[in-house]
Amino acid sequence: MKSRIITFAAIMMAATATMSAKKAPAVPPSPTARTIEIQQPSMKVFLPTNPTGRAIVVCPGGSYLGHAINHEGYDWVEFFNEKGIAVAVLAYRLPEGDRTKPITDAEKAIETMRDSSSVWHINPENVGIMGSSAGGHLASTIATHSTGKAKPNFQILFYPVISMRQPLTHQMSHDNFLGQNPSSTLEEEYTNYLQVKQDTPRAFIAFSDDDSGVPPANGAKYYIALHEAGVPATLHIYETGEHGWGFNSTFSYHNEMLADLTAWLNGF
C-alpha cells in the first residue's frame, strides 16, 4: 500500500509540473534577427526578423560635439525592427574643423544600406534618414544637399537644428559645424529651409513647444519650405517636453509621438 501511495504522489507531482510548464508565458521572438558592426563609417546595423524592405539611418544629436547614442540611437532599434524596418545607428565623425566629416559618413551610411540591399533584404528605393537635434541638422543637410545614391527617400527629424543663422540656430552646433566666424554665405548654405527643392524627400518633423535649446521655429520654417515646394510633410509640436527627449518614456507625449510616427510611416 505504501508503495502505491508513493507512486500516486509522484504521478501527481509530475502532472503539476507539466501544468505549470504549460502555463508559463511564451517569450516573444526578438524583432532583431541580426546585428552587424561596420567600421567605416562607424555604425551598427540591426536587421529585423520580418523585413518589409524599409531602412533608416539614425543620426543621434550631441551639438556636433558628441553623440547621444542611446536615447537618440539604440533605444529606437526595437521600435523600428518590430515594424520590419532595418536600422543603422551611425556614430558619425565629429567635424572638429571639417564639416565634410559627418556629411561624408552619413552619405556613406545610406550608400552602404543600398549597396547591401540584396543581402539585407532592403528596398534601395525605401531608405530614409533620421536625426535628432544636431543630428537633425545633419539629416536635413543630407536630405537637401546630397544627390544620387546618397540621397534618402524620406526624413524623420526630432527637434532638429535647421538654421545656421541667428536668431534660430543653436550656437554650439553652429560653431562646431561651421566654426565660430563663418561667412554669411556659408551659414545660408547650411540653413536647410533655404535649400529645399521639389525633389527633397518627404518629412516627419517633431518638436516641443517649450524647447529652449532649439527654437521650434526651426521646424516650422522647414515645414513651410517643404509645403511650398510641394513636398509631403507633417509637423507635430507637443505642448511640453523641452529638448532632447528622444525615445525616453519620461517624455509626456511619448506614446502620442510614437503613434503619430507610426501613422506617418504607414502612410507611404
Image: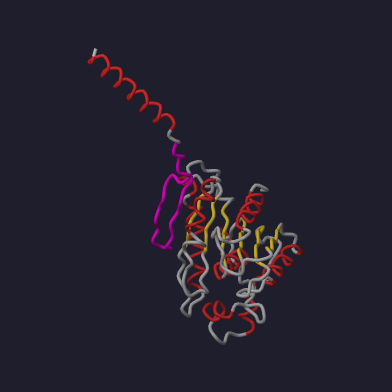
The percent coordinates of residue 107 (x first, y second) are: 52, 63
Residue in the foreground of this view, choosing between 159 and 109: 159
- Please identify the quarter of the rendering in which residue 129 is found: bottom right
The residue sitting at the bottom extreme is: 181
Residue at 47% x, 58% y: name it. Answer: 74
Residue at 53% x, 77% y: name it. Answer: 177
Give the colouring mode of the picture: secondary structure
The residue sitting at the right extreme is: 228
The residue sitting at the top extreme is: 1
Which quadrant would the N terminus be assigned to in this image? top left
The percent coordinates of residue 168 (x first, y second) are: 66, 77
Question: What residue span does the magenta drawing correspond to?
Answer: 26-48
The residue sitting at the front extreme is: 1
Residue in the foreground of this view, choosing between 232 and 208: 208
Residue at 47% x, 62% y: name it. Answer: 70
Residue in the foreground of this view, choosing between 251 and 102: 251
In the rendered image of this protein, does residue 49 appear above or below residue 182?
above
Residue in the foreground of this view, choosing between 26 and 201: 26
The percent coordinates of residue 99 (x first, y second) are: 51, 75
In this image, 17 relative to 227: left or right? left
In this image, 223 relative to 86: left or right? right
Does the magenta segment cover residue 38? yes
Residue at 75% x, 62% y: name it. Answer: 227
How many numbered dots are placed on residues in this image? Answer: 0
- Please identify the quarter of the rendering in which residue 26 is found: top left
Does the magenta segment cover residue 177? no
